[in-house]
Image: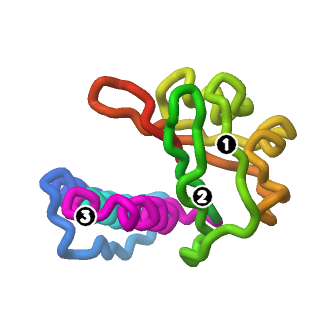
Amino acid sequence: RSLGDLVGDADAIRHFEFSRPIALDSSIKEVAELAVTMDGMKGTIHRFLEITQAVAAEQNFDQLLPRLLGDTLSVAGARAGVLYLAEGTRLEPAVALDATGAALPGALPGLDTTDAGHLLGASLADGVARAEPLDGEDRKHLGLARTGLAGVSHAMAVPLLNRKKELVGAM
């Protein structure tokens, strides 16, 4: 019966119905874990849809960037993030925030898209998001020591592409 209930919950998610929580009490550990994971997935999808609506409605570009980065950090459960805007072959930091929404201390360097470190460079080259451990090259290129984030061990890089698949920025 528990799996049947989860099938119904999955179908509700498929139809973007987020009103009821997934509350399942099963004595089978894996089924209970699946229910918790599905409830988290539902919350994340719902939050991303809210972010999309907020971004579409925002008229002020200067307010849009911090909101976009802050909401993304919140959904991802990240400690901090930087949103870069592309200017030719360079990425210039536009917004840098910690998880509370406060600006990161220190000035971050601009990056050349052809020499942005392993993680960000691979993400930009492939045009896809990547998440993996940071190496020394990544830390150096990203200037993490300047922001108090020198000890960060993992990161995610997300290239921001327009409809023509042209790079407009990165997070």
* Viewer can see residue 28: no
Residue drawn at 27 percent across, 75 percent down: 21
Q: Are marks 2 and 3 in contact (CB under 8 Å)?
A: no
Q: Amino acid at mark 1?
A: Gly
Q: CA distance from mark 1 to mark 2?
A: 15 Å
Q: Which residues are magenta?
A: 53-79
Q: Which residue is mark 3?
A: 58
Q: Which residue is mark 2?
A: 81
Report x, y in % for residue 159: 49, 36
Q: Which residue is mark 1?
A: 110
Q: Nearer the viewer, mark 2 or mark 3?
A: 3
Q: Amino acid at mark 2?
A: Gly
Label 1's element? loop
Residue drawn at 64 percent across, 66 percent down: 79
Q: CA distance from mark 2 to mark 3?
A: 21 Å
* Residue 166 relative to residue 89: left or right: left
Q: Along the polypeptide, which appears first: circle 1 or circle 2?
A: 2
- Magenta span: helix, strand or loop, mainly? helix
